[in-house]
Amino acid sequence: MDELSHRDHVCLFALDETGIRIESNNFYGWAPKGLPLYAEANGDHKGVNVIGATEILRSYKPYYSIHPSQEGMKSQHVGEFIDKLMHTNSDKEVWVILDNYRPHRSIAPEYESKYQGRLHFMFLPPYSPELNPQENVWAWLKDYCARDSAYTADKELPQRIRKFLVYAYNTPGKVSRRVDAKLYFKTA
């Protein structure tokens, strides 16, 4: 971490995916004594998958891509997102911290070769989401998107997500408190 922070023209991103449903997470309900709990739900499993990466070394800028949940998250989506990240940071060496999700592993050799030494992947140990700073951004996003009732239109949730990510992009100080590599990863 120290080595990367002392090098100019280097970006360090934490990358991950998350899913958010249009249905409410409010599972409070009521029931007459002795009867099963009634929880309001519309039974709709629609929503979105978001792939995102936040620069955790200097700028604390989030980048994202939103996909309908029906598509699932595929290697193609991850590859397109990496291309977008590399295009946006075309003058820099890019390091990406990510988990062992199969679409990540499957594209790594191809994309490291494609970007000829400008792109480096650092894979986290299996089953360790607590080591990925992007999880803190997702928790913040989900808290922002939480509602007492379901979204009424399919477009509402993506609009809310975009509004949040514009806010995060324009408030790097608030992002840094959640993801700063120097605070997140202790160096010996």
Image (cartoon, rainbow, N blue to C red):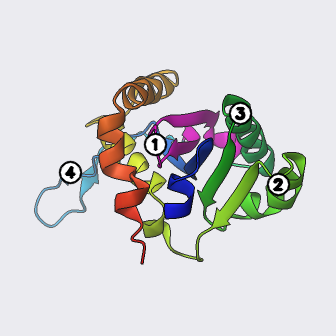
Residue picked out by circle 1:
58
Q: Say which label, 3 or 1, has the lower sequence index.
A: 1
State the extent of the magenta-drawn residues as a range.
46-72
Secondary structure of the residue carrying numbered label 4: strand
Q: Please, what is the three-letter code of the amino acid marked with disc 4?
A: Gly
- Distance (Cα) linking label 1 and label 2: 23 Å
Q: Residue 116: where, in percent of width, then height?
A: 86, 49
Give me the residue at 59% from left, 44% from top.
8
Give me the residue at 50% from left, 53% from top.
5
- Distance (Cα) linking label 4 and label 1: 45 Å
- Distance (Cα) linking label 4 and label 3: 54 Å
Q: Say which label, 4 or 3, has the lower sequence index.
A: 4
Residue picked out by circle 3:
91
- Distance (Cα) linking label 3 and label 2: 16 Å
**10 Å neighbourhood of mark 4: few (<14), some, or many (≥20)?**
few
- Distance (Cα) linking label 2 and label 4: 50 Å
Q: Is residue 24 left or right of residue 155?
A: left
Q: Say which label, 4 or 1, has the lower sequence index.
A: 4
**10 Å neighbourhood of mark 2: few (<14), some, or many (≥20)?**
some
Q: Please, what is the three-letter code of the amino acid marked with disc 2?
A: Glu
Secondary structure of the residue carrying numbered label 2: helix
Residue picked out by circle 4:
29
Q: Nearer the viewer, residue 45 or 166?
A: 166
Nearest to viewer (mark 1 / mark 2)? 1
Q: Please, what is the three-letter code of the amino acid marked with disc 1?
A: Arg
Secondary structure of the residue carrying numbered label 3: loop
Q: Say which label, 1 or 2, has the lower sequence index.
A: 1
Q: Is residue 111 left or right of residue 42?
A: right
Residue picked out by circle 2:
112
Give me the residue at 25% from left, 37% from top.
148
